[in-house]
Amino acid sequence: MQLVQRCPALFAFSPEALGATMGAISALTGLQPHQLPQLVAADPSLLLQPDRLKANMRGLAQALGVPLPEIVSLASREPAVLALSGAEAEARVEAVAGLLLPQDGSAVALTRALLDAPGALLQPEPSELEGQLRALEAALGPVVGPSGRPTAPCSSASPSTQPAAADANTRPQAERGSAPPCSGEASCSVRGSVEGGCRAEGSGGEARTVDPALRQAVAAVVLARPSLLGTPPEILAGRVAHLARKAGVPGMQVLHAVPAGPNLLAASSCFVDRHCAALAQTLGLEQGGPGALRRDPALTSGILRPSSTTPSATPSTIPSTAASAARTPSPAATSSGSASTSAPSGALASDPTIAAAVAAAAAACAAAEAEAEAARMLVARPELLGQHVTALAAKWQLLGGLLGSDPAWARAVADTGAGQRAELLALPYTTVARLRYLADRGLQASVQPLEAVRLSDALFHYAHPGFKDWLRG
């Protein structure tokens, strides 16, 4: 009914005529039938004058400086762009170039960016788009800070206690599958809006100067997922701050990771928390130190933390270690005088209630560090957020067996960081097959595992000509 209200002349169409018109539009534009509603919703009058699409496609190709087949490919990802006339397309291209690309950006960079993110052409008028961008920069500025790390909040609440409180409040909502944003996002958004209001103008009312690096990062984020402009800036700032604190990385690093995986900001903090927890538990990151590969006991030990050099902590050692720490008197206990000196040295360790509490606290710390490691892996490889943890666990097990097949490989990846682990986990199976080939042929000594997977297909096939035949078999 909304389409008919916007274009009453559609009442004159019979179902047969409407179906024939839609078929003609599909043949003209190369769009699939299920994509046509997006185009019609953008401009219903195209059903009355489908020939306008030819002029629109030519105008868009001229505005972008690309051949017509590229427009067909672009429209398959964002059908609504075909509703723009040639003049509208030129105006939108100029607006995007002025707002989302650096001043020294070339026309080729502009074309590549718009072909990758055609949704940027469908954003509001340039003045409204600029206002949205500036609002997002103002919200993210206090979160990122001049040094790239989140700044201290304006409120009197301790920033170290807020993430924990947010976790406690948001996890029940996440388990119920609720859609509203996490309280962590809300608290960060409130702080961001307060600080943004404090810093948007100086003492004399002048506009706050935005860091060029922040402006460039925000532009890259919007180009990667233009629909993020529909989310309140304070919510996006809260998500950046939450993930940065969870992973222990600068906020700017999170922003730089978003273009490779926009879901880092499109998804709520509750969803990211659940994914990190599931990833840490499924991959067994808390076993044998952060980032240790969980493998079948029958396989040789020592992938990332060789047992011969760095023995992993076992559940039986955690209480004794924690209890020994508990036996060390704190300054407060020392100042209390007779209360601390009269207690036997092993009283705390022998108390089962205290020992259980200390063990539970140690386990909670290990789980939190494992989730932080998973968060760092997501920041390093944001595409992992869109993959199911069960599939990732299967690949993790396969990598564990392959990398443990040779002591040199095991040592090479023993102390790798979250970025290298995430790189291995994000590999396609056709690339993982390289490691299997090298292990089957006993060629581990000829190349390091990370070097093997980073080689281009041409170079790897040149170095190992038998790989193609082996892969076919």
Image (cartoon, rainbow, N blue to C red):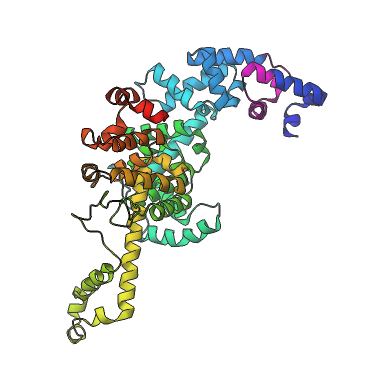
Query: Which of the 4 image quadrants contains residue 108?
Result: top left
- Residue 445 location (% of width, % of height): 21, 36
Relative to residue 222, is residue 157 drawn left or right? left
Disc count in the image?
Answer: 0
- Residue 28 location (% of width, % of height): 65, 16
Q: Where's the N terminus, which quadrant?
A: top right
Residue 210 seen in the current view:
no
- Give the answer, above or below, for where 296 lies relative to 71: below
Highlighted magenta segment, given as a residue range: 25-51
Between 365 and 403, which is closer to the camera in this rendering? 403
- Give the answer, above or below, for where 188 lies relative to 340: above
Relative to residue 148, is residue 330 drawn left or right? left
- Name the chief secondary structure element in magenta: helix
- Residue 323 location (% of width, % of height): 24, 73
- Residue 51 location (% of width, % of height): 68, 13
Query: Which of the 4 image quadrants contains residue 110?
Result: top left
Relative to residue 325, is residue 118 drawn left or right? right
Q: Residue at x 65, y 30 (%)?
A: 34
Between 429 and 387, which is closer to the camera in this rendering? 429
Relative to residue 178, is residue 211 drawn left or right? left
Magenta residue check for 17 = no
Q: Residue at x 18, y 79 (%)?
A: 335
Query: Which of the 4 image quadrants contains residue 224?
Result: top left
- Give the answer, above or below, for where 57 lies relative to 191: above
Residue 92 seen in the current view:
yes
Between 339 and 75, which is closer to the camera in this rendering? 75
Q: Where's the C terminus, which quadrant?
A: top left
